[in-house]
Image: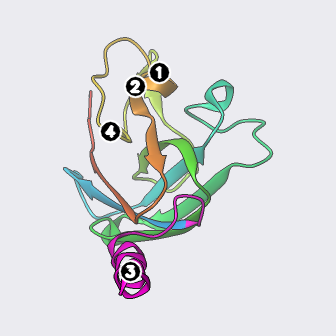
């Protein structure tokens, strides 16, 4: 009888959640785009020193996705850990953030939707955790000009 109860407990654990160390899917939705034109340039990193643009990050994940697909983007499975994500709405598809006097002319957004004051937010304020279950980030784009 005890073995049967223990077996039921193990089944309940298996149904409830995946082990924390298994890769989990990341899905991203983007809200507040000015238009469906152009591309979304997405940078995903685990390393604070390479946030927000992923420059020099050997393990970065970079995606270039049509803005028209912004509602529901599957970005693959990620190993457990902490990540931060930055998005540029590259309206003219030139693969860079256009600025005027240092102010972005195109939309920007970050995981966890931290406040944006003077410059990009910190890795810590945009950090989210992957582990044990699928992850979804809904990001609100911000436009300054």
- Of residues 3 and 107, the one nearer the viewer is 3
Mark 1: few, some, or many residues within 10 Å (few <14, many ≥20)?
Answer: some
Please say if the residues under marks 2 and 1 sit with CB atoms less than 8 Å apart. Answer: yes
The main secondary structure of the magenta stretch is helix
Please say if the residues under marks 4 and 2 sit with CB atoms less than 8 Å apart. Answer: yes
Mark 3: few, some, or many residues within 10 Å (few <14, many ≥20)?
Answer: few
Q: Which residue is mark 3?
A: 2
User: Mark 4 to mark 1: distance in Å?
Assistant: 11 Å
Instruction: Specify the farthest residue to the top.
Output: 118
Q: Which residue is mark 2?
A: 125
User: Mark 2 to mark 3: distance in Å?
Assistant: 47 Å
User: Residue 40 vs residue 56: left or right?
Assistant: left
User: Residue 102 vs residue 59: left or right?
Assistant: left
Q: Nearer the viewer, mark 2 or mark 3?
A: 3
First in sequence, mark 4 or 2: give its number: 4
First in sequence, mark 4 or 1: give its number: 4
Magenta run includes residue 5? yes
The residue that appears at 53% across and 42% down in the rendered structure is 83
User: Mark 4 to mark 2: distance in Å?
Assistant: 7 Å
């Amino acid at each position: 009888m005890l073995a049967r109860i223990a077996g039921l407990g193990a089944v309940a654990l298996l149904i409830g959640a995946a082990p924390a160390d298994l890769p989990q899917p990341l899905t991203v939705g983007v809200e507040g785009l000015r238009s469906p034109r152009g591309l979304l340039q997405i940078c995903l990193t685990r390393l604070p020193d390479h946030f927000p643009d992923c420059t020099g990050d050997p393990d970065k994940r970079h995606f270039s996705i049509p803005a028209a697909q912004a509602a529901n983007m599957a970005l693959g499975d990620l190993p457990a850990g902490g990540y931060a994500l930055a998005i540029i709405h590259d309206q003219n598809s030139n693969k860079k953030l256009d600025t005027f006097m240092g102010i972005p002319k195109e939309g920007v957004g970050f995981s966890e939707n931290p406040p944006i004051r003077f410059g990009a937010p910190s890795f810590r304020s945009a950090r989210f955790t992957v582990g044990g279950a699928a992850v979804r980030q809904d990001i609100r784009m911000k436009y300054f000009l």
